[in-house]
Image (tube, helix red, strand yellow):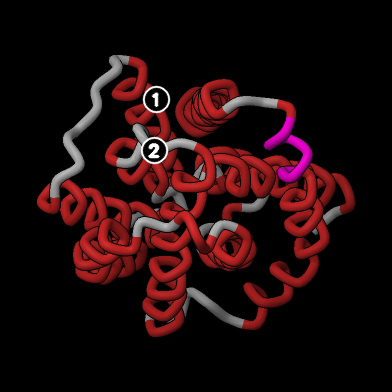
C-alpha cells in the first residue's frame, strides 16, 4: 500500500470510527465506499476487525444503557444471516460486490429519507438482524437495517445497544470469514497498520458527542455515505 493510499484509507477509518462511536453505526457506510475505491482487498475482513474494536470500546463506555432484550432478538437473526453473507462473498465477483455496497448504502439513505420507522417488535428485530448479518459479512455494511429499527432510541441507549449487537455480530462474521479463507495474515497486518486511526476516531467521538446532537450526527453520516456510494458507482460503472 502506497503512502497516499494509506493516508486516504486512514482518514476514512478515523472519520468512520468517530461516527460509529458517536451514533452506534456508520463505520461501514462511511469507510467501505472509500476503501473499495483505494484497496478493495481490505473489504470486508479488515474493516470488520476495525469495527469490532470500536464497538467494544463503545460497549464498555455505554454498558449501563444497553437494551439487552432487543439485542438478543436481533442476534437470533444475525446468525443465519452471517452464514448467508459468507457464502455470498465467495460467490460474487469483486466488481459486483462493489456495486452491491453502493446499492446498500443508497437504499438505506432513501428509506431513511422517507421517514419510515418500523415498529420495535420481535419479528422486525429478527428480520433486521438477519439482513444486517448478510450485508455486514459480505460488504462490512451492516448498519442500515439496525439503524431503522432502533432509530427512535437516543444518546447512550442507541450507541450502546447497536454497539453490543455489532460487537457480537462482527465476531460471528469474522469467524465465518476465517472459515472461508477470507481472513489471513494480510488482513491482520492491515488491521494493525490502521489501528492508530481507529483509536484516534474513537477518541474524537468523545468530543463530537458534546458538540453535535444525535440528529446532526445521523444526517452527517447519511450524507457522507451517500456521497461515497455515488463516487463508487461512477468509478465502477462509468470508468470501468
Q: Is residue 73 visible?
A: yes
**Residue 33 coordinates in the image, percent (x, y):** 55, 39
**Mark 2 and mark 1 residues within 8 Å of each other at the beta carbon:** no
Q: Which residue is mark 1?
A: 109
Most common secondary structure along the magenta stretch: helix
Specify the farthest residue to the top. 114
Which label is found at residue 26?
A: none
**Residue 186 coordinates in the image, percent (x, y):** 67, 75
Residue name at image x 60 percent, y 66 percent: 60
Other-residue count near label 2 (Cα within 10 Å), few / some / many at <14 / 14–19 / ≥20 = some
Up-down: is 195 above or below 177? Answer: above
Q: Nearer the viewer, residue 114 or 66?
A: 66
SS assignment at label 2:
loop
Specify the farthest residue to the front. 64
Q: What span is colored magenta in the figure? A: 205-210
Residue name at image x 72 percent, y 52 percent: 202
Which label is found at residue 153?
A: 2
Q: Nearer the viewer, residue 100 or 162?
A: 162
Residue name at image x 58 percent, y 46 percent: 20
Residue name at image x 74 percent, y 47 percent: 14
**Residue 50 coordinates in the image, percent (x, y):** 63, 62
SS assignment at label 1:
helix
Q: Nearer the viewer, residue 46 or 237?
A: 46
- Between circles 2 and 1, the one closer to the viewer is 2
From the viewer's perspective, tell me whether residue 38 is left or right of residue 8.
Answer: left
Locate residue 181: give its quadrant: bottom left
Report if residue 206 lies within the magenta region.
Answer: yes
Q: Which of disc 1 and disc 2 is earlier in sequence?
A: 1
Up-down: is 220 above or below 181? Answer: above
Mark-to-mark CA distance, 2 and 1? 18 Å
Amino acid at each position: 500500500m502506497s503512502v497516499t493510499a494509506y493516508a486516504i484509507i486512514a482518514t476514512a477509518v478515523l472519520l468512520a470510527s468517530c461516527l460509529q462511536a458517536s451514533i452506534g453505526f456508520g463505520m461501514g457506510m462511511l469507510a467501505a465506499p472509500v476503501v473499495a475505491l483505494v484497496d478493495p482487498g481490505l473489504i470486508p475482513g479488515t474493516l470488520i476487525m476495525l469495527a469490532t474494536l470500536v464497538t467494544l470500546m463503545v460497549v464498555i463506555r455505554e454498558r449501563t444503557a444497553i437494551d439487552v432484550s432487543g439485542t438478543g432478538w436481533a442476534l437470533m437473526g444475525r446468525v443465519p444471516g452471517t452464514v448467508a453473507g459468507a457464502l455470498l462473498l465467495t460467490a460474487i465477483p469483486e466488481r459486483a460486490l462493489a456495486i452491491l455496497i453502493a446499492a446498500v448504502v443508497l437504499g438505506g439513505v432513501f428509506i431513511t429519507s422517507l421517514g419510515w420507522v418500523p415498529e420495535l417488535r420481535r419479528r422486525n428485530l429478527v428480520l433486521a438482524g438477519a439482513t444486517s448479518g448478510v450485508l455486514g459479512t459480505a460488504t462490512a455494511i451492516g448498519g442500515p437495517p439496525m439503524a431503522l429499527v432502533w432509530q427512535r432510541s437516543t444518546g447512550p441507549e442507541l450507541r450502546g445497544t447497536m454497539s453490543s449487537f455489532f460487537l457480537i455480530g462482527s465476531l460471528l462474521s469474522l469467524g465465518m470469514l476465517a472459515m472461508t479463507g477470507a481472513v489471513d495474515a494480510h488482513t491482520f497486518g492491515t488491521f494493525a497498520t490502521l489501528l492508530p486511526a481507529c483509536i484516534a476516531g474513537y477518541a474524537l467521538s468523545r468530543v463530537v458527542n458534546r458538540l453535535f446532537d444525535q440528529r446532526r450526527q445521523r444526517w452527517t453520516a447519511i450524507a457522507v455515505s451517500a456521497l461515497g456510494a455515488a463516487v463508487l458507482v461512477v468509478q465502477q460503472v462509468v470508468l470501468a
